[in-house]
């Protein structure tokens, strides 16, 4: 058996004789040593929970600082009177609208009316867009026939669907959900199609070899492999559904529909109340940011962490 000495660059045989190493032999030994050191470094990484203070400083402080900066600039513009009050309200005037709506018990009603419609419509779009995306991605004829239509629908402004939806379904919640579906389903389906297109063909062949075909292959191979693209499509689908709902609530108003955030925005315009308009805009932004932070960002981090793509320090 031959023993080696990596430090001297020689090798020792059974009889005790030594010989100089060749260049390839030296490089192979150094490569093995580097690989062993890298594995040791990976094993030495300790996964621990991030302290609460560090989490707050890294996640909460930057957005709060940005909000404080925006409010300061906004108040400064009000002080220098770049626009009259009926065009640019002060932050305190908008805050008064918030407190008035809270005291009247209508603030949470505005938010819930729109949120319930938006989330239910998005879940319906998810149930339709997911199998549609699988079908388009896996069947060539369907892809050739439906794929361009989905891309065209995704580029069509969602507000264009409001007038025909009102004529077809009337002023009711069904009209709202129809507009949401027409805005969100193409984005979800296209996101899933893009994710499936990025799956390495070797994964699909290995799945078929192991017997994962049909629905079993879609559940165990296709969907996990397409998850990053699918998640991106879900985020975009939610954005489209939320925007579609706001457009429908602004254009179509009825006592039977209640007052959502879009209707609140339109009421502010009709009442020439710029502070109410700003209130509606901020609430729409707040809901969109909250859904992203509470639902989609954790899902995205979990997917990236499961694939070893999320580096935490």
Image (cartoon, rainbow, N blue to C red):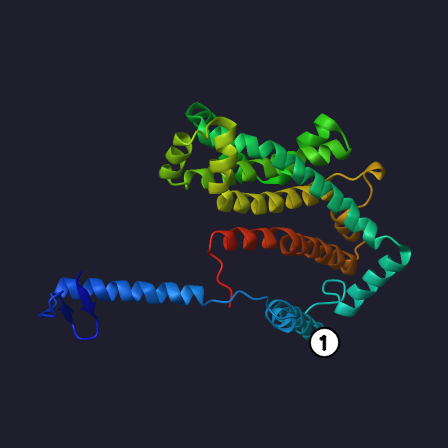
In percent of width and height, residue 121 lies at: 69, 38
| Residue drawn at x 64%, y 56% as measured from the top left | 293
Q: Foreground: 59 or 200?
A: 200
Q: Where does label 1 land, which residue?
A: 79
> Residue 94 lies in what quarter of the image?
bottom right
Q: In this picture, is 72 found above or below 195?
A: below
For residue 40, side relative to residue 76 (left or right): left
Q: Foreground: 69 or 12?
A: 12
Residue 149: in sight, yes or no?
no
| Residue drawn at x 81%, y 38% as measured from the top left | 257
Residue 26: in sight, yes or no?
yes
> Residue 290 lies in what quarter of the image?
bottom right
Number of numbered discs overlaid on the protein picture: 1
| Residue drawn at x 75%, y 45% as measured from the top left | 114
In percent of width and height, residue 197 lies at: 42, 38
> Residue 100 lies in what quarter of the image?
bottom right
For residue 80, side relative to residue 226 (left or right): right
Q: Foreground: 140 or 288?
A: 140
């Amino acid at each position: 058996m031959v023993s080696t000495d990596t430090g001297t660059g020689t090798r020792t045989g059974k009889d005790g004789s030594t010989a100089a190493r060749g260049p390839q032999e030296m490089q192979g030994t150094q490569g093995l040593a580097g690989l062993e050191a890298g594995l040791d470094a990976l094993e030495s990484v300790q996964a621990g929970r991030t302290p609460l203070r560090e989490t707050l400083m890294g996640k909460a402080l930057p957005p709060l600082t940005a909000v404080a900066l925006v409010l300061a600039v906004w108040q400064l513009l009000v002080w220098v009177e770049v626009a009259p009050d009926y065009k640019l309200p002060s932050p305190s005037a908008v805050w008064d609208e918030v407190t008035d709506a809270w005291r009247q018990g209508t603030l949470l009603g505005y938010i819930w009316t729109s949120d319930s419609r938006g989330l239910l419509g998005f879940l319906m779009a998810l149930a339709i867009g997911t199998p549609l995306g699988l079908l388009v991605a896996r069947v060539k004829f369907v892809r050739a026939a439906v794929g361009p239509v989905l891309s065209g629908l995704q580029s069509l402004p969602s507000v264009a669907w409001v007038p025909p939806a009102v004529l077809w379904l009337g002023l009711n919640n069904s009209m709202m959900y129809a507009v949401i579906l027409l805005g969100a389903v193409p984005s979800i389906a296209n996101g899933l199609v893009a994710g499936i297109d990025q799956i390495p063909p070797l994964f699909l062949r290995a799945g078929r070899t192991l017997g994962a075909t049909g629905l079993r292959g879609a559940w165990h191979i296709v969907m996990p492999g397409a998850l990053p693209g699918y998640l991106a499509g879900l985020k975009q689908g939610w954005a489209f559904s939320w925007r579609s709902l706001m457009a429908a609530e602004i254009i179509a108003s009825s006592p039977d529909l209640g007052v959502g955030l879009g209707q609140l925005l339109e009421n502010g315009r009709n009442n020439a109340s710029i502070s109410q308009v700003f209130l509606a805009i901020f609430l729409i932004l707040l809901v969109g940011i909250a859904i992203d932070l509470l639902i989609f960002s954790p899902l995205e981090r979990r997917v990236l962490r499961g694939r070893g793509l999320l580096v935490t320090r």
